[in-house]
Image: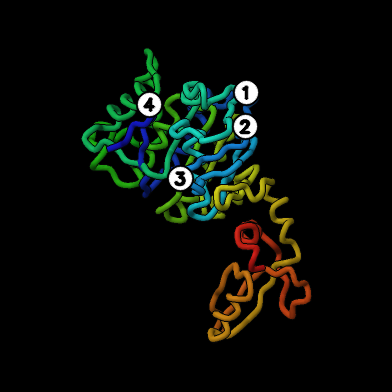
Amino acid sequence: MGLVVNGILIVHHETNSVHHSFFHFISHSKTFEKIINPIQMELAIQNVSKKYKKNKYGLKDFSLTIEKGILGLLGPNGAGKSTLLKMIATINKPTEGVICLNKNNIVKDPDYMRQQLGFLPQDFGVYPNLNAIEFLSYIAAMKGVGGLGLKQKINRLLEGLNLNDVAQKPIGSYSGGMKQRIGIAQVLLNDPKVVIFDEPTVGLDPEERVQFRNLISDLANDCVVILSSHIVSDIDSIADKVAVMKDGGLMAYHNPDELIALVNGMVYETMISKEELPEFKSNHLVVSTSRKGAQIAVRYITRNGNQPTHRKKANLEDAYLYLTKKHRA
């Protein structure tokens, strides 16, 4: 079952198949048209800290201003990404600092955010005995969404998400992909202006990951969309800006090309034996390895420009690893 915190249902995301009709729906439905309002959006996070116990911080003096478009939030596990997102979603309060949406302090007035928020958390669960219509009607009531048009809106969502045929069946009988689509439906119920996805592609196969990225691109016309992941490929092709986090702090905030420029001329590839690999890893920042015959091709980052190896074109994964592990470069 889901967990209700401060009036918000926390649901868990599982995966399997996401059908193409869903993406056609997102691009053409009236529900989505309401999302793309030509309004200015600004989410300002100002000197925010979250302290759990003495000298233990989930976030420390974190500041970031996010405008409409897609923000890719990258960081290793434990970087503070989920802590930040739960505070933006008003599930948790910061120990210090202020978070404002369009200059409205959502720490003091969380309902201002909740009325405009669509949130798919990392931990997504369902009420297995409810069918899709019952579940979405319940979530709509939790979000304060109602009126004569609610039934029509739910029907449009289910049709666009290719769930009409199972709408009357208990959600507990759904596949993982179907449950994911129900999670996406509840995100869109209140025509959100701020949309948060926390590690949404964990467990998805490669085709599903591509489809999910297409969805996020469609959502971003006039919303603030925050996509949190530790998987760089989820971010690199769709993000307008990328924020890299580590140990509760902000390491960098740029567009993808500006981040990649940080490691231009520093990425190399060399061939070594399997026996040489452990020592090489201890002395270099290794991005990836691949076996080529009896040898191993190693892609690595170094600030020493005099390398007797092949220089490679830098990418976002190179920049991300450099920022989070550059003490080894």
> In the rendered image, is residue 265 in sight?
yes
First in sequence, mark 1 or 2: give its number.
2
Q: In 3D space, how far apart are the residues under numbered discs 1 and 2 (Cα atoms)?
A: 8 Å
Q: Residue 189's quadrant in the figure?
A: top left
Instruction: Locate the N terminus and report the quarter of the image it occupies.
Output: top left
Q: Amino acid at mark 4?
A: Gly
Q: Amino acid at mark 1?
A: Lys
Q: Residue furthest left?
A: 129
Q: Which residue is mark 3?
A: 53
Q: In 3D space, how far apart are the residues under numbered discs 1 and 4 (Cα atoms)?
A: 23 Å
First in sequence, mark 4 or 3: give its number.
4
Q: Residue 293's quadrant in the figure?
A: bottom right
Instruction: State yes or no: discs 1 and 3 in contact (Cβ < 8 Å).
Output: no
Q: Position of residue 123 (x, y in %)?
A: 38, 44
**Of residues 294 and 21, the one drawn nearer to the viewer in this rendering:** 294
Q: Is residue 236 above or below residue 162?
A: below
